[in-house]
Amino acid sequence: MNKLTGTEIIEILNNNYSMSSIGYGEWAELEEESEVGLTPAQQATINDVKEQKGNYWELNQSYILENLGLGKVVEVEQHGGEGEGDSWHVVHHFVDHDVYIRLDAYYQSYSGTDFDGSKPYEVRPKEKTITVYC
């Protein structure tokens, strides 16, 4: 797998996913116009797992991420929602590329998380030291 830059990952995300799919990490929920699919062998494996009542959803997501060239994705932070004010965000780490992508959204208690106008962007982890007095 070729190592992708943050810009390349964002382009793949924008071309294949809705902002809510990115926000919630629903990697199998591709946009209708996405041309990425499963190979016949991958589909056969998923069908076998499905028949055995296994976790085919996770396998399906893994295959799609592989076919997109994104590899393993881990959600490393999610903040916001009920009791946290109106801001919400999530950060996903694209492990094979060592790239972190953040997506900001707006939260309202009566309608949930709103991704209108949201755009993913690259971030980097930064250690922060604080002093507290107990």
Image: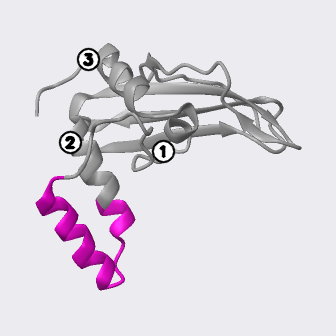
Query: In the figure, residue 36 lies in which quadrant?
Result: top left
Q: Which callout, 2 or 3, points at the residue further toward the start of the chain?
A: 3
Looking at the picture, tell me which residue is in the foreground, 114 or 79.
Answer: 114
Instruction: Give coordinates of residue 110: x percent, y percent.
Output: 89, 44
Amino acid type at mark 3: Thr
Query: In the figure, residue 8 lies in which quadrant?
Result: top left
Q: Which callout, 1 or 2, points at the residue further toward the start of the chain?
A: 1
Quadrant assignment for the N terminus: top left
Residue drawn 38% across and 64% down?
57
What is the C-alpha distance between the residues marked 1 and 2?
A: 16 Å
Taking the image as shown, residue 39 lies to the left or right of residue 88, namely left
Q: Which callout, 1 or 3, points at the residue further toward the start of the chain?
A: 3
For the stretch drawn in magenta, what is the main secondary structure?
A: helix
Taking the image as shown, residue 117 lies to the left or right of residue 4, namely right
Residue drawn 38% across and 25% down?
15
The residue that disc 1 covers is 25
What is the C-alpha distance between the residues marked 1 and 3?
A: 19 Å
Instruction: Give coordinates of residue 91: x percent, y percent.
Output: 50, 32
What SS does tag 2 mark?
A: helix
The residue that disc 3 covers is 5
Instruction: Give coordinates of residue 6: x percent, y percent.
Output: 33, 18
Amino acid type at mark 2: Asn
Pointers 1 and 3 in contact (C-beta within 8 Å): no
What SS does tag 3 mark?
A: loop
Q: Nearer the viewer, mark 1 or mark 2?
A: 2
